[in-house]
Amino acid sequence: MQEKSSILTKNQGFIEAIQNNNTQVLKNLYTSNYPKIEILVLKNNGSKDQAKDIYQDAFLAVWQNIKQNKFVPRSESSINGYLYTIAKNKWMDVLRSQGYKKTIVASQLSHFEIKDEENNGMDDDILKDKRLEDVMQAFKNLGDACKSLLRKFYFEKKSINLIAKELALDSASTRNKKYRCMQKLKEIALKTD
């Protein structure tokens, strides 16, 4: 019983270190998980730059969710799994948005299917069209700077490094700006529901 208690204390210390922005813990978490995400992206039609971008977005999402108690991990391994899942889902979103969906086997997209209880009897195609309309409407309501940045990344398929040069920023700032623009887009899209 005491062993279980010490594990809980260790895990709680790890979680608190993340919530308190402990640089060493965050760096270790970041570097230990990145190789798995890079392999995932490279094996699924992606590049190293894309892997870095996806991982940055996923890592920031996990970090924010832990800080805001939206995700309460039971262990370090549950954080690793959560991070991998978010990165995987973000990469699947990129593949779908870039027109790769014709080359992806349908079974790989099963977690994107809409559950019956979500659609209240609506036809899946109608619901998906409605969601797309909501996102496109939200995109129209974004500021010009965000629209430009997201258009360059997702539609023109430019790398973060190239966009950073165009904006006269460093890559990290550009990634953060892209992340904030995506969060704003999600916020606007969710308000339209």
Image: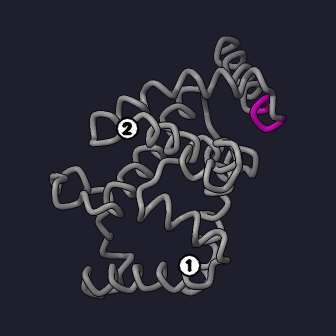
Q: Of 167 and 47, which appears nearest the observer?
A: 167
Q: Residue at x 52, y 27 (%)?
A: 33
Q: Of 110 and 160, which appears nearest the observer?
A: 160
144 w.r.t. 78: above or below: below
Q: Residue at x 54, y 64 (%)?
A: 150
179 w.r.t. 32: above or below: below
Residue 79 covered by magenta stretch? no
Asked which quadrant contains residue 59, the reply is top right
Q: Is residue 94 left or right of residue 59?
A: left
Q: Main secondary structure of the magenta part?
A: helix
Residue identifier under label 1: 189
> Which amino acid lies under the numbered mark 1 shown in the image of this protein?
Ala
Residue identifier under label 2: 47
**Picture mark count:** 2
Instruction: From the top left corner, tell me how far across and down residue 105 is, in percent.
Output: 15, 52
Instruction: From the top left corner, tell me how far across and down residue 119 is, in percent.
Output: 35, 81
Q: Residue at x 35, y 52 (%)?
A: 92
77 w.r.t. 107: above or below: above
> Which amino acid lies under the numbered mark 2 shown in the image of this protein?
Ser
Q: Secondary structure at mark 2?
A: loop
Q: Secondary structure at mark 1?
A: helix
